[in-house]
Image: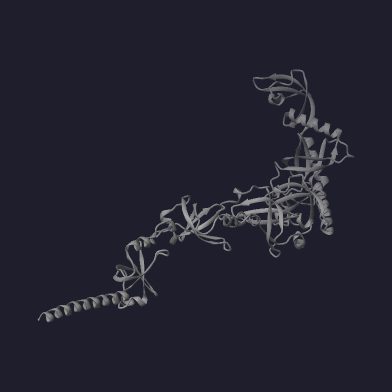
């Protein structure tokens, strides 16, 4: 019932009821007539209603569902006179049924009926109950004149039966006021005692569930079901379940009773220190799986969160559902207890063997393995070896420094690599592909040595020197102090420079060259050449002198 449906008005009930009865008596009269003629062509029958009077009745009223005529000429028939010569067999049937109901009515037994409002008059409403028409005075209806009542379903109490007049009066107001009084009594007891009571789940919705407590419905909001926080009630309860609840509040205007299930039990967070501790291993049940993690039920009305990064040591977990299912029981470790935020975090991977430990038992630096490229980044490629990933940095991908991992690999490719570093503490493995190939510097060293003169073009400048490209795969460094007589500030990119090789390291792939040493070397070579020429000249003169 809505409050806008209620309308209470002080009127003379007896006078209104009397007027209604008078109208009923004047317009309707139950009599017994006789069928004198049946005219199927005209679809009508003539009824002798006594006193030398005949009235016409439609054949449709005396046909059954199979279109069979129920009477024949000479048969007696009950009819109701409707005024102005009109009669009705169907109305008579209702009147007979009503009379039978009235005769069987026991005033000592309270009777509640449910029907539909079919008519409205000045005094009130006609309510049809199982084919019978009862009268509901307006003042007993709790229906507003502003609201359309025709077609409305109502439940009411029989308050008066008049056998002489053949009428039944019902009251909706009586039932509503009883319910109000009962509700107020129930609410008063619930709010006063604050003790948990047993209720029955009547209906479950997305925002909570309605629970019957002693004949009154209250709402348990989804946030008041569990200490875990807002939950979907349909995952925990079914209609008909018994639940223990406590009354929180009652809105008299809205007639809204708020209930709580979680407040009817102790709060586990008040005793969390006695129940759990960081580092504890507990058995939990998976209650929900999302792409970002898993919610697990610890019992005791506690829930924890298992982040996707804590599911496995494998860093490429795409979705937790690939590892577990709802309702699975798993062991996890408590890794965080935040009492202020009422938050628990757990880990599954901390209870699993660390892949790095197994890897280091079977492999060492210098081993050559075949792995699978799992992902590509701007700085290199991650390669899966056994159950762990290693990094193949761009600078270890190829001896050609212009080549990156993205240029030669795609996800899923198999690649042979060499382990060049294992950092167990950090859980990192460094790999190299170029270490399995001949270094361009090795090839270069086969045809060049320290002191050889080379020519290259400036590729880059740093504070400590200039990088010169000797060919497409080999760069050499000229330190700032080895540039003389060239000036650092005057050197430009792509400028051609001649220098002498001063250092070759095939293992690290480094070459250093020097302009300064070239200058000295060329000076020394020139001096040696000059001295050689002078020695040759003196020898010739000496010979001539000796000859003379």
Left or right of 438, for residue 20: right
Left or right of 423, for residue 196: right
Q: Percent position (x, y) of residue 494?
A: 30, 68
For the residue pair 523 and 157, the one nearer the viewer reads as 523
Q: Quadrant of the C terminus?
A: bottom left
For the residue pair 230 and 442, the one nearer the viewer reads as 442
The residue most toward the right is 108
Q: Is residue 100 above or below residue 461?
A: above
Does residue 251 appear anywhere in the picture?
no
Image quadrant in which you'd find residue 261: bottom right
For the residue pair 229 and 324, the one nearer the viewer reads as 324
Q: Is residue 71 above or below residue 510?
A: above
For the residue pair 353 and 276, the one nearer the viewer reads as 353
Q: Residue at x 83, y 36 (%)?
A: 165
The residue most toward the front is 547
Q: Percent position (x, y) of residue 1?
A: 74, 49
Q: Percent position (x, y) of residue 168?
A: 82, 38
Colour theme: one colour
Q: Percent position (x, y) of residue 280?
A: 71, 59
The residue most toward the top is 73
Image quadrant in which you'd find residue 272: bottom right
């Amino acid at each position: 019932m809505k409050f806008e449906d209620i309308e209470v008005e002080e009127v003379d009930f007896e006078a209104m009821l009397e007027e209604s009865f008078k109208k009923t008596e004047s317009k309707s009269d139950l009599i017994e007539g006789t069928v004198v003629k049946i005219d199927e062509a005209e679809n009508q029958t003539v009824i002798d209603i006594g006193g030398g009077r005949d009235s016409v009745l439609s054949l449709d009223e005396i046909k059954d569902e199979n279109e069979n005529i129920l009477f024949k000429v000479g048969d007696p028939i009950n009819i109701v006179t409707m005024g102005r010569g009109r009669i009705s067999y169907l109305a008579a049937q209702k009147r007979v049924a009503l009379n039978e109901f009235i005769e069987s009515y026991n005033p000592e037994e309270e009777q509640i009926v449910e029907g539909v409002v079919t008519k409205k008059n000045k005094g009130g409403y006609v309510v049809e109950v199982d084919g019978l028409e009862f009268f509901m005075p307006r003042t007993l209806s709790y229906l507003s004149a502003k609201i359309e009542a025709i077609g409305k379903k109502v439940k009411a109490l029989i308050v008066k039966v008049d056998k002489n007049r053949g009428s039944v009066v019902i009251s909706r107001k009586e039932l509503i006021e009883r319910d109000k009084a009962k509700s107020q009594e129930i609410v008063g007891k619930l709010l006063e005692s604050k003790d948990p009571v047993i209720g029955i789940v009547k209906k479950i919705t997305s925002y909570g569930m309605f629970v019957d407590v002693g004949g009154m419905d209250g709402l348990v909001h989804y946030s008041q079901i569990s200490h875990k926080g807002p939950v979907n009630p349909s995952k925990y309860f079914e209609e008909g379940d018994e639940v223990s609840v406590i009354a929180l509040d009652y809105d008299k205007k809205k007639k809204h009773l708020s209930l709580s299930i979680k407040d009817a039990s102790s709060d586990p967070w008040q005793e969390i220190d006695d129940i759990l501790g960081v580092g504890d291993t507990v058995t939990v049940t998976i209650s929900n799986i999302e792409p970002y993690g898993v919610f697990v039920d610890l019992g005791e009305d506690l829930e924890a969160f298992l982040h996707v990064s804590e599911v496995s040591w494998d860093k490429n977990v795409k979705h937790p559902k690939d590892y577990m299912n709802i309702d699975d029981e798993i062991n996890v470790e408590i890794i965080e207890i935040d009492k202020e935020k009422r938050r628990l975090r757990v880990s599954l991977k901390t209870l699993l063997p660390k892949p790095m430990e197994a890897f280091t038992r079977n492999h060492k630096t210098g081993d050559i393995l075949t792995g699978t490229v799992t992902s590509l980044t701007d700085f290199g490629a991650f390669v899966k070896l056994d159950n762990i990933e290693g990094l193949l940095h761009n600078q270890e991908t190829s001896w050609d420094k212009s080549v990156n991992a993205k240029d030669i690999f795609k996800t899923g490719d198999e690649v042979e690599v060499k382990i060049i570093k294992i950092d167990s503490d950090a859980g990192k493995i460094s790999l190299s592909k170029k270490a399995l190939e001949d270094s361009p510097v090795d090839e270069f060293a086969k045809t060049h040595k320290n002191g050889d003169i080379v020519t290259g073009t400036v590729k880059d400048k740093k504070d400590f020197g200039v990088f010169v490209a000797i060919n497409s795969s080999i760069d050499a460094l000229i330190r700032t102090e080895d540039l003389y007589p060239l000036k650092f500030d005057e050197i430009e990119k792509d400028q051609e420079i001649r220098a002498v090789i001063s250092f070759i390291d095939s293992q690290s792939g480094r070459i250093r060259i020097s302009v300064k040493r070239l200058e000295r070397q060329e000076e020394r070579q020139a001096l040696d050449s000059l001295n050689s020429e002078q020695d040759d000249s003196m020898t010739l003169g000496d010979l001539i002198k000796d000859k003379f």
